[in-house]
Image (spheres, rainbow, N blue to C red):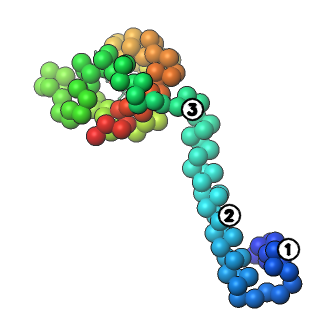
Amino acid sequence: MKSPNILQSQFVGASITRASLRSCFSSKLAKLALAASCAVTFPVLAADPPKGNIEAAKAKVSMCIGCHGIPGYRASFPEIYSVPKIAGQNEKYIQSSLRAYATGERTHPTMDAISKSLSDQDMADLAAYYSNLK
Ligand code: HEC
């Protein structure tokens, strides 16, 4: 681990004191934190430009609630038992599922038709909305 010391010496001069060792350690932590935050945010940014808007989704969920349950309602009615629960589901998962139906990668008669009527922004909004429903 030579480079942090070399870097450090530019900031604190030649004398390696306990204080400089401590700040060297914290600058390593800062770098780790930076690396970790890049690792977390990069795939998110790369995967999806449109940002979901929960408020905007409220005008769009009327076409989903008949099958996926009313907002905030956990249980399905017996006759729609096989409809998956999407409230609280992972945002990216919802978004990519909708895209998969729209592109034909995944098929289901009603979901195909519905997802084809949605824009990328609609999918992002709906994903944000449903992932935030408990
Ligand atoms: C006519 C009933 C119906 C409507 C309306 C409907 N869905 Fe679905 N949805 C289903 C069924 C049934 C499935 C399961 C299909 C399958 O097995 O692939 C499903 C699957 C899904 C999935 C994948 C869930 C998973 O666990 O993989 C998502 C996400 C989804 N719907 C979102 C929506 C959204 C958002 C809307 C409104 C724009 C909507 N659906 C409207 C019936 C419906």
Figure quadrant of residue 23: bottom right
Residue 13 image-quadrant placement: bottom right
Q: Is residue 71 visible?
A: yes
Q: Is mark 2 on a helix, strand or loop?
A: helix
Mark 1 CB lies closer than 8 A to ligand 1: no
For the residues labelled 2 and 1, the Cα–Cα distance comes to 17 Å
Look at 37% across and 36% down and name the residue there. 131
Q: What residue type is labelled 3?
A: Asp
Q: How crowded is mark 2: few (under 14 residues within 10 Å), some or many (20 or more)?
A: few
The residue carrying pointer 1 sits among few (fewer than 14), some (14 to 19) or many (20 or more) residues within 10 Å by Cα, namely few
Mark 1 in CB contact with mark 3 (< 8 angstroms)? no
Closer to the chain start, of discs 2 and 1, is: 1
Image position of 99 with respect to 11: above or below: above
* Cα–Cα gap, marks 1 and 3: 40 Å
- Against 79, is 29 above or below? below
In the image, taking residue 31 as reference, residue 72 lies left or right, namely: left
Callout 1: SS: helix
Q: Which residue is under mark 2?
A: 31
- Image quadrant where one finds the C terminus: top left
Q: Which residue is drawn at 56% across and 40% down?
A: 44
Q: Choose between 73 and 55: the one closer to the eye.
A: 55
| Residue drawn at x 52%, y 31% as measured from the top left | 51
- Residue under label 1: 10
Ligand 1 quadrant in view? top left
x and y, in percent, of residue 14 in the image: 86, 84
Q: Residue 48 carries which label?
A: 3
Residue 106 horizontal/vertical position (percent): 43, 22
Q: Can you tell which of label 2 and label 1 is closer to the viewer?
A: 1
Of callouts 3 and 2, the N-terminal one? 2
Which residue is pictured at 39% across the width and 14% down the height? 114
In the figure, is residue 24 to the left or right of 92?
right
In the rendered structure, which amino acid carries the disc numbered 2?
Answer: Lys
